[in-house]
Amino acid sequence: MRRAKITGIGAFAPEKVVPNSFFNEILGEDVDTWLRENLTIRERRWTGENESTADLSEKAALAAIANAGIVPADLDLIILATDTPEFVSPSTSSIVQHRIGAVKAGTFDINTACAGFVTALNTASRFIASDDDMKNILVIGAYNMSKYLDLHDKKTVTLFADGAGAVVVSPSEAGDGFLNGELYTEGQYNEWMGIYAGGSRTPVTKEVMDNKDHLLKFVKKFPKELNPAIWTKMVKTACEKEGITPQQIGRYFFTQININSIWQTLDNLGIDRDKGEVIMSTYGYTGSACIPMALNEAYKGGRIKRGDYLMFVGSGGGLAFASALVKF
C-alpha cells in the first residue's frame, strides 16, 4: 500500500521574545505566576512589525525541504494551514510557492483554525495514497495571532504567540507513514471564540476597528472536559483501527493550548505524561503551528526515531478536531 511518509521536518519562530513580565506591566497585575504555575508558560515569540505569516511559513518550509534532502522544484503540492493568513485572498500558500521557487507545485490553504495542520496532514496523505503523480507534498502550519490581539484583553493576550512548522511527505510502500486519521467537528461552538470581522458577514469599518471587533475574542468559556474527552476518543479509535494499544505509541503531539488538557488525556489513556511533547513553556500557544513545532523539537531532541508510532491530535475554533496516526 502506498502511504505518505514524513521525510522532512522544519520549524521557525520569530526572534522577538515576550516574557510574562511584559504582561504584568501592561495589565497592572501579576499574571506571570498564574501562567507559570497553571500553564507552564514563561515566554512566547511574537513577530515584528513587518514580519508576516508568509515570512514564518517560508522559513519553516525551507527548513523542512532541506531536511528532506530535496529542493523546492521537487514539490508537487503545497498545503498551508492557517487562520491568520497573509491576505483574505489570495492564498498564503501561493505566496510561499513563489518565494521558495516551487515552480511545479500546486497550492491551497486550509482553515480549520488550530486543527489545521493535522487536517492538512490528513489531506496530503490521501493525495499521496491516491495519486501516483504526487511524489513530494509540503504541509505547513503557520500562526501569526499576535497581529490580532488586544493588548489589554487578559484572556487572550497572555496565551497566543507566533510561529510555523512544516513537514514534507513522500510515498512509501514499506508499511510506514500515515496509517489513519479522523476529522470531527462540533459546529455549535462556532461563535464561542474567533476573529469575527474582516469577512463577508462583518467587513472591517471604522466602527468595527473602534470596537476592536477585528481582533481575537473569547466569547464564551469552553467546557474544560471537551478537549480531553474528544482527544481520548480519537486516540483510541486510531489505535483500534491498526490493532495497537495507546501504550505502543512512542510520542504524542496535542494542540498546545492547555497543559492540563494534555495531561488529562494521557492520564485517561494510562500513558506516562513524559510521552507528551510540550513546548508551551517557551513558545506559548502557536495554534496551527504548535504541533509541527513540537514535532520539530522532538526530532531535534532525539525523542522520536524511525519506526516509532506518533499520534497527532489537533483542535481549534469551530470547534474542529483532527487526528493522525503515523509510523515514523
Image: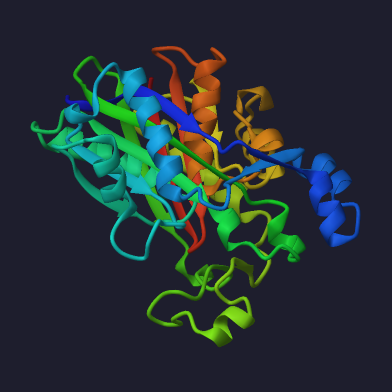
**59 vs 132, nearest the viewer:** 59
Which residue occupies the foreground of this view, 144 or 248?
144
Determine the image quadrant of residue 10: top left
Image height of 320 relative to 126, above or below: below
Q: At 56% from the left edge and 55% from the top edge, which residue is drawn?
A: 145
User: Which part of the image, by quadrant, shows the C terminus?
Assistant: top left
Q: Which residue sits at x=50%, y=28%?
A: 295
Front residue of this view, candidates 92 and 240: 92
Residue at the image position 60 percent from the left and 33 percent from the top: 269
Image quadrant holding the N terminus, namely: top left
**Which residue sits furthest bottom?**
207
Would residue 322 be found to the left or right of residue 95 on screen? right
Residue shown at 66% from the left, 61% from the top? 223
Look at the image and name its color scheme.
Answer: rainbow
Name the spot of residue 110 as percent of width and height, x first. 34, 53
Whether residue 247 is visible, yes or no, is no
Furthest-front residue in view? 50
Q: Is residue 175 left or right of residue 282?
A: left
Q: Is residue 53 visible?
A: yes
Asked which quadrant contains residue 308, the reply is top left
Residue 195, percent from left and from top: 53, 68
Q: Position of residue 103 (x, y in %)?
A: 16, 37
Which of these two is toward me, 260 or 8? 8
Q: Residue furthest right?
A: 29
Q: How many marks?
A: 0
Image x and y of residue 122, in percent: 32, 41
Relative to residue 258, is residue 49 drawn left or right?
left
Q: Quadrant of residue 216?
A: bottom right
